[in-house]
Amino acid sequence: MTASPYPRDPQTLLDALAGRLIVSCQAPPGDPMRDTDALVLLARCAHAGGAAAIRANEPEAVAAIRAEVDLPVVGLWKDGDTGVDTGVDTGVYITPTVRHALAVAGAGADVVAADATDRPRPDGSAFAELVAAVHAAGALVMADVATHAEGLAAAAQGADLISTTLSGYAPGSPRQAGPDLGLVASLAAAVSVPVVAEGRLHTPEQAAEALARGAHSVVVGTAITAPTALTRRFAEAVEGRTPRP
């Protein structure tokens, strides 16, 4: 594992992300892209395209990307059913315990992203305990939240960044086709820590609008790094249509 090009000084790292794009290089279980070498290639492409950082899932991918890509890494560990396809709340699954968080930090993540919703964590810990453990390990914490109240609580518990990742995927948040820019704006106006816009950012225009609404950075995944999902959208759009003569 190579050292991060950015010292793990909070302000230095946050300044490097200000007004910039973080690219999420992940793939769901069963997807052909769920391969560490493939994810590293995606991260290298994101770097070449101008990304400021990479968001990656699982310690193995975090370590591999850290070794090959000269950018900060936002690491997480999804463990459990995400419920995204069914719309059923399956509980905390993004870095659900202190153990998961420390494994991600140990793999080289500059920032550890973790669920900071008000749902109970599998190990019975409080989010503040995870924050303290990650800080002791030398990394920052990105709190993935679904609501305004959760963002306020995460900031009060020491999170270094607040992300709108779980809006639309956890109870109490609106299900919508596009990004929750209202949540971005309300949190940016209410907390002193940087707010990150993440979730259903489909176009460059939406990403720019998120920054205009007060986001410190934006995270884009599917629209950039998910060829299976993108192909499916096009295939479904044209299926059954009769070509013009």
Image (cartoon, grey):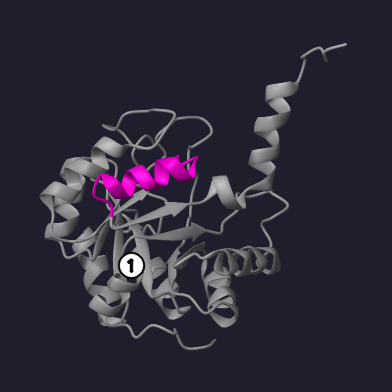
**Residue 234, percent across and down?**
69, 31
The image quarter containing residue 241 is top right
| Crowding at mark 1 (Cα within 10 Å: few <14, some 14-19, many 20+) | many
Instruction: Examine the rendered structure and indicate whether residue 56 appears above or below residue 189.
Output: below
Task: State left or right for residue 121 relative to residue 23.
Answer: left
**Farthest residue, direction right:** 245
The structure residue drawn at horizontal position 37% and vertical position 28%, both measured from the top left corner, is 175
> Magenta part of the protein: which range?
199-215
Task: State left or right for residue 15 relative to residue 150.
Answer: right
Query: Is label 1 in a helix, a strand or a loop?
Result: helix
**Residue 141, percent across and down?**
29, 67
The structure residue drawn at horizontal position 50% and vertical position 44%, both measured from the top left corner, is 81
**Residue 57, percent across and down?**
51, 61
The answer to if 73 sits in the magenta stretch is no
- Which residue is denoted by mark 1 in the rendering? 98
The amino acid beneath tag 1 is: Val
Q: Quadrant of the C terminus?
A: top right
The structure residue drawn at horizontal position 59% and vertical position 76%, both measured from the top left corner, is 64
Residue 199 seen in this snapshot: no
The image quarter containing residue 33 is bottom right
Instruction: Examine the rendered structure and indicate whether residue 28 appears above or below residue 89.
Output: below
Closer to the camera in the image, 108 or 224: 224
The structure residue drawn at horizontal position 69% and vertical position 25%, both measured from the top left corner, is 236
Task: State left or right for residue 27 relative to residue 210.
Answer: right
